[in-house]
Every structure is written in structure tokens, then in C-alpha cells.
Image: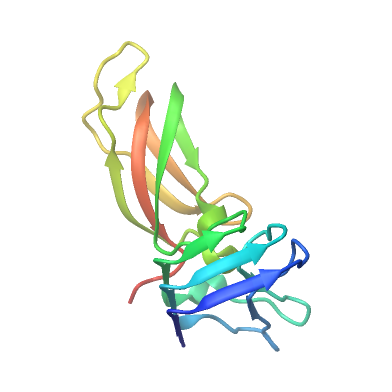
């Protein structure tokens, strides 16, 4: 399913209003081949929380089987939380820590899991408490946390700095 190039407008709706709602009618349902790109979402006279949701009143989605989901290049006006997949975000760890927990989950559509970390790059240098530059790469653990919507980075020593991470709620192939 492709939803492309539309203008979605809502006026005077409740904050829980969503334009795209998926309602599974049995166990084992999952998303595959969904593309939501190049659209404009605009809520007038009061914001809404986000543009998409899963109605789990009958059954939930199997997020561990999501494949080929494109949710990008959209414009959001009057929407509290933008939805992006894949999402490229910047995270800063101010105090040196051996384990960083990054939380990109709010950006992923349909409360998706952080299934794939497609890219991770330091922004500048990662440094120890003694200001030494770390030249090694961390272990990357997606699907971390109780909602499987976080990414954990494990370093050999406590470090601080900034990273750019691209995360997906699906497997691209």
C-alpha cells in the first residue's frame, strides 16, 4: 500500500485522533510493503498526538515481522510527534558512561520496535572522563528495553559525546 502526495487536514479533533489506524483482526498479523511518503498532515485548532496508530482491541501487530516500511518525507503541522522510518537522530551523552541507552522509539511508526540499526556515526570525538579519544566501536543492541524500542550501545570504557544513528522499525529485505 502506498499513501503518497496527499494533504490530510483535521479541524477541532481530540488529541487522540489519528489519520492512519491499523486494526488487526487476529493473531500473527504484521506490516509489509507500506509506504507513507510525501504527505502533509495538518491539525487545526489544537494538536493531535501523532498521525498513525494500531487499534489493538482485537489483536496486536507482530512487530517482529515488519518488513519494507517507508514512512518519510512527510510534513507535520499541529502534530506533537513526527513519525519517521528509517529515522536518523542525534543523541548526546553528556556524562561518561560505559552503556548508553538511546530512545528513538517515539519516532517509529505504529509503536514499532528498533529492529535494525542501519548506521551509527560519531559526531566529533567520543572521549573518556580523562579526555582521551576512544577509537573503538561500541557493541550495538537493538530491541532493548521493555517496549523493544530502544538501542543500547556498549563501550569498553565510560565515554561521552554525540552520535548520529539511523534506526528502522522493520527489516528492509
Q: Residue at x 64, y 64 (%)?
A: 43
Residue 117 at what x, y percent from top left? 37, 56
Vertical side of 165 occupied by 147: above or below? below
Task: Note whether 91 is above or below 29 in the view shown.
Answer: above
**Residue 131 x, y percent position in the rendering:** 30, 13
Left or right relative to 26: residue 169: left
Please say whether residue 71 is visible from this viewpoint. yes
Tell me which residue sits at (43%, 38%) in the image: 91
- Residue drawn at x 48%, y 75% as measured from the top left: 66
Q: Position of residue 172 (x, y in %)?
A: 35, 73
Count of marks overlaid on the render: 0
Question: Is 52 displayed left or right of 45 in the figure?
Answer: left
Residue 72 rendering spot, x and y as whole percentages = 41, 66
Judging depth in this view, the residue of 29 and 45 nearest the camera is 45
Between residues 51 and 87, which one lies in front from this camera angle?
Answer: 51
Q: Nearer the viewer, residue 86 or 130?
A: 86
- Specify the color scheme: rainbow
Quadrant where the image shows the C terminus: bottom left
Q: Is residue 146 left or right of residue 83?
A: right
Q: Quadrant of residue 41?
A: bottom right
The answer to whether residue 96 is visible is: no
Residue lying at 28% horizontally and 35% vertically, measured from the top left = 123
Toward which corner of the image does residue 28 lie, by quadrant?
Answer: bottom right
* Residue at the extreme top: 130
Amino acid at each position: 500500500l502506498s499513501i503518497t502526495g496527499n494533504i490530510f487536514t483535521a479541524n477541532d479533533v481530540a488529541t487522540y485522533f489519528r489519520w492512519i489506524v491499523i486494526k488487526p483482526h487476529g493473531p500473527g498479523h504484521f506490516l509489509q510493503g507500506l509506504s507513507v511518503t510525501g504527505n502533509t498532515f495538518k491539525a487545526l485548532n489544537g494538536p493531535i498526538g501523532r498521525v498513525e496508530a494500531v487499534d489493538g482491541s482485537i489483536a496486536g501487530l507482530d512487530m517482529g515481522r515488519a518488513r519494507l516500511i517507508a514512512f518519510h518525507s512527510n510534513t507535520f503541522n499541529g502534530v506533537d510527534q513526527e513519525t519517521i522510518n528509517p529515522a536518523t537522530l542525534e543523541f548526546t551523552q553528556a556524562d561518561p558512561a560505559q552503556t548508553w541507552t538511546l530512545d528513538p522509539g517515539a519516532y517509529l511508526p505504529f509503536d514499532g520496535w528498533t529492529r535494525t540499526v542501519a548506521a551509527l556515526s560519531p559526531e566529533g570525538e567520543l572521549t573518556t572522563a580523562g579526555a582521551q579519544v576512544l577509537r573503538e566501536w561500541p557493541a550495538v543492541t537493538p530491541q532493548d528495553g521493555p517496549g523493544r524500542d530502544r538501542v543500547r550501545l556498549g563501550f569498553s570504557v565510560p565515554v561521552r559525546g554525540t552520535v548520529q544513528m539511523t534506526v528502522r522499525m522493520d527489516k528492509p529485505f
